[in-house]
Amino acid sequence: MLDENRLFPSDSAARSVAAKLYETVRDLPIISPHGHCDPRWFAEDKAFPNPAALFITPDHYVFRMLYSQGVSLESLGIPQLDGGESADPREVWRIFARHYYLFRGTPTRLWLDYAFEKQFGLKDRLSPQNADSYYDLIAKALETPEFRPRALYEKFNIEVLSTTDTPLDTLEFHKAIKESGWKGRVLPTFRPDSVIDAEYAGFVQNIEKLGQITGEDIGTWKGYLNALRNRRAFFKSMGATATDHGHLTAQTADLDTATAESLYQRILSGHSVPQEQQIFQAQMLTEMAGMSVEDGLTMQLHPGSVRNHNKLVYEKFGRDKGADMPSPTEYVRALRPLLTKYGNDSRLTLILFTLDETSYSRELAPLAGHYPALRLGPPWWFQDSPEGMMRFREQATETAGFYNTVGFNDDTRAFLSIPARHDVARRIDCAFLGRLVAEGSLDEDEAFEVAKDLTVNLARKAYKL
Amino acid sequence: MLDENRLFPSDSAARSVAAKLYETVRDLPIISPHGHCDPRWFAEDKAFPNPAALFITPDHYVFRMLYSQGVSLESLGIPQLDGGESADPREVWRIFARHYYLFRGTPTRLWLDYAFEKQFGLKDRLSPQNADSYYDLIAKALETPEFRPRALYEKFNIEVLSTTDTPLDTLEFHKAIKESGWKGRVLPTFRPDSVIDAEYAGFVQNIEKLGQITGEDIGTWKGYLNALRNRRAFFKSMGATATDHGHLTAQTADLDTATAESLYQRILSGHSVPQEQQIFQAQMLTEMAGMSVEDGLTMQLHPGSVRNHNKLVYEKFGRDKGADMPSPTEYVRALRPLLTKYGNDSRLTLILFTLDETSYSRELAPLAGHYPALRLGPPWWFQDSPEGMMRFREQATETAGFYNTVGFNDDTRAFLSIPARHDVARRIDCAFLGRLVAEGSLDEDEAFEVAKDLTVNLARKAYKL
Amino acid sequence: MLDENRLFPSDSAARSVAAKLYETVRDLPIISPHGHCDPRWFAEDKAFPNPAALFITPDHYVFRMLYSQGVSLESLGIPQLDGGESADPREVWRIFARHYYLFRGTPTRLWLDYAFEKQFGLKDRLSPQNADSYYDLIAKALETPEFRPRALYEKFNIEVLSTTDTPLDTLEFHKAIKESGWKGRVLPTFRPDSVIDAEYAGFVQNIEKLGQITGEDIGTWKGYLNALRNRRAFFKSMGATATDHGHLTAQTADLDTATAESLYQRILSGHSVPQEQQIFQAQMLTEMAGMSVEDGLTMQLHPGSVRNHNKLVYEKFGRDKGADMPSPTEYVRALRPLLTKYGNDSRLTLILFTLDETSYSRELAPLAGHYPALRLGPPWWFQDSPEGMMRFREQATETAGFYNTVGFNDDTRAFLSIPARHDVARRIDCAFLGRLVAEGSLDEDEAFEVAKDLTVNLARKAYKL
């Protein structure tokens, strides 16, 4: 099913260089510095329940496509907020198989085929005809010890895997992993949206909880900042090397302390207006950058997603159900306050992501090609795809170079897709480098070095892993 | 003149797959679900008057390029609003031939060369030297029965051709075609801009005419909506399967009935302000979507064109004279009111177009890859070109897949260009699929299926043809 | 070090056409109608002081990349406003060599390698190991007569080279060149930002100086315009054929004279608000277009750069230190006032540039493909690169054609990079044309003609050289 040379340029000159480069990075360990795996998997090391629960229910890439063609989320077994009845996983799998043709030309298809063949030895394309035999074979495999989370982590040759966690999390599963004696490195990431984004559902209660956990007086601006410092320190003590921030825009601010204090009081009152909430978020990004200068945690910014665009889906199924939509995102003016304060400070590493590809050559590469504190994250979400990755390299490299980028993030909730996703990234990087070599604009010996840097070294350095 | 393998990748591996795919779709019938051919041609079936009137005067792609290089529209015989004297068609043709080099690298050149060679057997490139012999040969051919509109329709292997018509149109020519016994399918499309866009010239008078035609009381909001329903039903009875909407933005609204009623009265008063007119248009898109849910007409939205940008040209020559310009177009927030109301309803098919390619990967593919009611129209106008089509596939497929797109639209006013335009689209789709196969990310047997779907099946389904 | 076929498509069919085309344009003279070389070099014809002063200190492409990776500007010898101590050039060179790997995949690397090999015969890639031998060899060469500015100008086969000069400049160096009897053509360009952009540092004093130089009464709107006319005439008498305008946006205006007069008085008062300053700039672009209609100077517009984004760098090192950032730029609405007034007038040639590539297919090509006065400048600054140039051709050609573009600008402050930059442009144009021929959408004989037009003819015509 899988072509040995997939995703390499079809032109033979570029392809042969790409293939040679790929040989040298294919088996390097996986560095996964950003993603959404559940630490509980590795703490408890239980079997995954069934093929649908492994491949379909947790993966919004999969069910958003099915939904777009009229397949109901109920029929796919997506959990309903009101606890409505669940679907039979075998029936879910059959629906999926009947619609497998929808994924032609998508990265989801590449990830799935890779997992089917490499993890389960399935070499015939999934179809309505073989849906049941696929299901049975995968279900049986999942019962074996080789398919437990820790065994897969090891089989996948993962060197380190970071999760995404709220400051209100006790990190009990990370603690359990650490104490279990298992040698896998599963690290938390400090993602404070719920306690710094005043538009977040339950924001004020979250802050109160933050106060209780840390013993800080969150009734004051200073106490609130200390509470955040306190949790960052705790996360760091549990192995965290990075923070992550998912804001609607990249807006930052640099208010004087008195203004920030008074704004915080307005926010805390629960009667603030949206403009106040937005400037508060903007200020908090700058505060987070300042704390990163202090404690050395690498900072990630993922702006531009209009969350929960589909009201019906949100009300029935909740967050993260494939209905988040990108929007135009500006960086040059938005980041200026933060960069004026910390952009020249090499102690800060701020990794920028985008859902708006127009910013690659226009804003992100010029910014990262100048400010010492900035680096560019890999193509994200809708752009985490062969064409998307290629556009990123084509549009960012000439101004930012390779060394202001940070390697690949799989960013996934679908554990089985991790090796497939890293494989796609490695192939596309080698395809890009292969073309540069074949076109005589990069020396071959340099390409080998860059390929390795893109695969492991840049991620290790940027995320301090 | 025409290369057998034109527009296929030059790399031999991808090219050979592309060529094989193309073999299987080249001769499929033409589905033309959206365009601007004149139904009168087929009702009256008269000869086209002369080569200039066939190739130059009606085609803004042609005369805008000549105008950009200093050729006056008067000298090209573009009709003047004040009835100023017309140009000699042979002289127009000579000017055209002298400037034929300007079209190098443009799709217009591909369309023209195709028509010259395939319809007229002309194999030497048009030049100042052969301008007269070209003119004579074409003029002579136009006098023959083989070059009458109906004969060409049949020769072109057109299965169905939709026109674009205002609700105030009596559809007399469509009626005449139907009653003539000719078997060609020429269908009207309901394009109500002139009666729902309050900024349209003569808007209030148009509404009054609408009332007269339908016998509805357009003095009330309810009567106005009923008048539109009435005309939609009439169009449907005449074969229409779709509506089309050309708005400046994609803005939609969902006002409560009382607010909508009162807004309608303001609009009707003739004293509304631009903001009111814009919110009215936004509301009307949502109303149209609701009526499509009722009557099953597929809905098309073509936003983003700043019409009549060149005041001098507009005042002297009128609308559609090559002076419409694209502008940045936002979809994610703009469509939310409509999508919240109807986006999850599979009875609606809303086909989105754009003149802003940045929206492909950022907004359109994510929206169409989620909402059951949405589909993506093909590259439009300035992007209806080899590079433009390729960018569309590269930027939309990974998130929307192939099956949330709807095949090709020729969208033309130049009848002779129809086979050429469909040929370009088929070649580019095969080139794209050929690359995917050659790069091992799509199986060849699937590519054959997709090629056929893109050529006929998706258009038939989306437009209910 | 340099591959004979670099930057040609790796596919052999397209490559062989590209190579044939390139053969015919490689040795054509260099037309450099826009750039930032110092006329003093050619007036005085002194030796360049040392390798660092030639390749690093004046080239923001070079030091911005080094700075982005934590190399301080002080250590690179970038002059400090407070006159802080300077760096040892050999030490600067060593730092540069140690970080040479950062330029992999960037156009800077292509330019540098070309200069090293073609001008100095250096064929081993620069590295920490050979840094000193590189330095010594280059330093020695710079002492020879062959490396004086005039000798290099001749060796580079430059036909004409335009500089960029403020209206307050006496053009003494241009005068000296003219009077020296040397046959090189070094022409001034009228760049009036400092006297028409009210946000420019020292704007009011600059206007006063303008009054003194011209003897016009700059206290009145009419006198101010006359002063500008006067300086344009002076520049023209010194050989200038063009003006250039670097504004934050492309906004234009067309105020009636009374309003313009009163606005000018507000601006002159020194108490205007930013909105007034912006509308003044907008008005001045239209005034400049009007003067171009009068005096025939070609007009260039370079909008969209957010200047001096990095406050720390600006305060310590001043302007043009690699901290200018692009921003989204709108053209269709912004240019409408100017185009309504002068866009249909073929006496005006207005060349548009952009830092926002999204405008190529959406706005710039449609505008230039219609208005007789408009032409498109080549990819600029961050887009003056192989990928950037290719995107420009791919995105602009289908709507604007080749003949609404104006050939290449090197736009450089780094004299040694001029042949390298023109070579890259020629190669990419041939690569693009080679692909069109190989894909059968352009005839080979036409490609040869277009290649030559893109290399010399279009620039000569657009800039009246």
Image (cartoon, coloured by chain):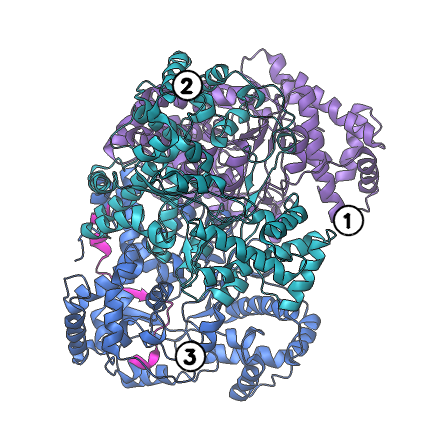
Chain colours: A cyan, B purple, C blue
Report how far apart the C-alphas of labels 3 and 2 lie in the structure: 65 Å
**For the residue marked with disc 2, what is the amino acid?**
Leu
**For the residue marked with disc 1, what is the amino acid?**
Val
Which residue is more in the foreground, B83 or B460?
B460
SS of the residue at dot 1?
Answer: loop
Tell me if residue C25 is in the magenta stretch: yes
Report how far apart the C-alphas of labels 1 and 2 lie in the structure: 50 Å
Can you identify the residue that label 1 sits on?
Answer: B273
Q: Mark on residue C237?
A: 3
Is residue C422 in view?
no
Magenta-tinted stretch? C18-41
Q: Residues within 10 Å of mark 3 (few under 14, many from 20)?
A: few
Image depth: mark 3 or mark 1 in front: 1
Can you identify the residue that label 2 sits on?
Answer: B28
Image depth: mark 3 or mark 2 in front: 2
Is residue B433 in view?
yes
| Screen quadrant of the C terminus of chain B | top right
SS of the residue at dot 3?
Answer: helix
At which x and y percent is residue B278? 71, 44
In this image, A288 relative to C39: left or right? right
Q: Is residue C229 above or below residue C309?
A: below
